[in-house]
Amino acid sequence: MNFSDSEIVASILEEEGYVSTKDIRDADIIFVNTCSIRDHAEQRVRKRLEYLQSLKRKNPRLVIGMLGCMAERLKTQLLEEEQVLDLLAGPDSYRDLPQMMAEVESGTKAINTLLSIDETYADISPVRYGSNGISAFISIMRGCGNYCAYCVVPYVRGQERSRDAASVILEAEVLFQKGFREVTLLGQNVNSYSWNSDGAKTSFALLLEKVAAVDPLLRVRFATSHPKDISDELLQTMARHNNICKAIHLPLQSGSTRILGKMNRGYTRDKYLERIDAIRTFLPGCTVSTDIIAGFCDETEDDHKETLSLMEQVGFDYAYMFRYSERPNTLAAERYSDDVPAGVKDRRLREIIDLQQKLSFLSNKKDVGKTYEVLIEGWSKRSDDYFSGRNSQNKVVIFPVTGNNPGDYVRVKIARFTSATLIGDAN
């Protein structure tokens, strides 16, 4: 979602006559778009600012600004701690960037971190400056209203609000006309998307169907689903349309019902497994990826073993795995003690990673001999003799270059694999 926000910022600034550069040394303005989900992400930003300070010493007129969640969370504290910063803009303040730049140019530091109850940037066409010309993100909602105990998002991105459905569909149509062949609909919890217009309600399942109807050659993905909200209606919609990709990211976080309750996730272990069964029933062959947190407050060895056992039971195709880091002002920080020792967190995370590597290996092994339709995204990073693309299941597929071009669909028979990649030959 940060990448999508950066494209919105680029669009706003280009409208004011600013021009982007690929060489940071040529820049007169540098914006750092930030995330506050984990402490590690914030520490990386701090290190990046040290480098930017060196650029500013060489060019005192260089303007450096911080955007997004970290700017929202720390606000004026950042201006005091990071003297290199000239500007702070929260995720709902991007329209004000031209005015804020004028303030900086007049010799004052600028800050706007006010959150909005209705800002969705629906009327802004993002600049696809970092795109491969094949795949693009479409933000369909902003903010979050779930208040998971460990998560800072509701506090730094505001309350959940959905974007005008017609503007989402129009953006997908324009992208297809420009040659894009895949869009990913983005939201903190896409399942709770809801738009009302003249008494007609558009649910996420209906929005997904309308975007898929733009053209059969336009692949549609989405992220992220919440286990408590993913519906049979959505799964049935996915089953009806070949161009809605058969891949679902369904964050688990923990396999223990007790820990899920402390996390305020809104579902139990059994409820999560029931949703997995529904996915398997309606969408045979659909891949399922997940997020897992190791060492949440008061997590015991039994809780950890429940996570491992659920991973094996589901057989996740891949996962994003992290050790718990307490975020200030969250429910967990206020209510619970971060009492799992760092060494224990690290060991549990290592066990989770090791298991997932085995599961990913087994998942890819099952694909050998199968033929998939692959959307060519470009050339392999390792060799210009190979194309790289993804199948509907969101797996990377590498195969020898054919007479096709990026943006084409090619049927590829899988011959071998690694834990991260499928390798085959075009039919």
Image (cartoon, rainbow, N blue to C red):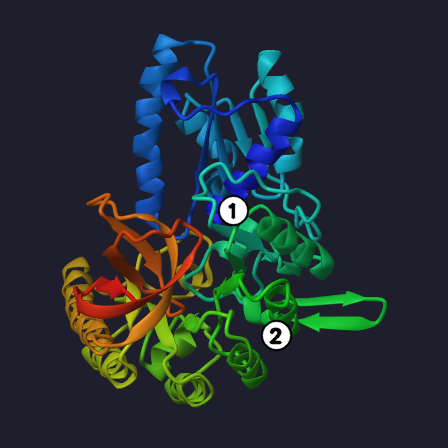
Alpha-carbon neighbours of circle 2 within 10 Å: few (<14), some, or many (≥20)? many
Read off the residue under disc 1.
4
In which quadrant of the rendered view does residue 349 lie?
Answer: bottom left
Would residue 140 appear left or right of 76 to someone viewing this image?
right
In which quadrant of the rendered view does residue 336 lie?
Answer: bottom left
Q: Quadrant of the C terminus?
A: bottom left
Residue 322 in view of the camera: no
Whether 399 is drawn above or below 83: the answer is below
**Residue at 42% of width from left, 21% of height from top?**
83
Question: Residue 178 versus residue 195: which sits nearer the camera?
Answer: 178
Relative image position of residue 100 (x, y in whole percent): 62, 25
Spatial separation of the CA atoms under disc 1 and disc 2: 22 Å
Would residue 291 appear left or right of 30 to someone viewing this image?
left
**Residue at 43% of width from left, 9% of height from top?**
60
Question: Residue 205 versus residue 56: which sits nearer the camera?
Answer: 205
Q: Amino acid at mark 1?
A: Ser
**Residue at 30% of width from left, 73% of height from top?**
371
Relative image position of residue 377 (x, y in whole percent): 38, 51
Q: Amino acid at mark 2?
A: Ala
Residue 379 in view of the camera: yes
Read off the residue under disc 2.
205
Pointer 1 or 2: first along the chain:
1
Whether 50 is drawn above or below 355: the answer is above
Q: Secondary structure at mark 1?
A: helix
Would residue 247 appear left or right of 51 to someone viewing this image?
right
Q: Secondary structure at mark 2?
A: helix
Relative image position of residue 232 (x, y in whole percent): 55, 85
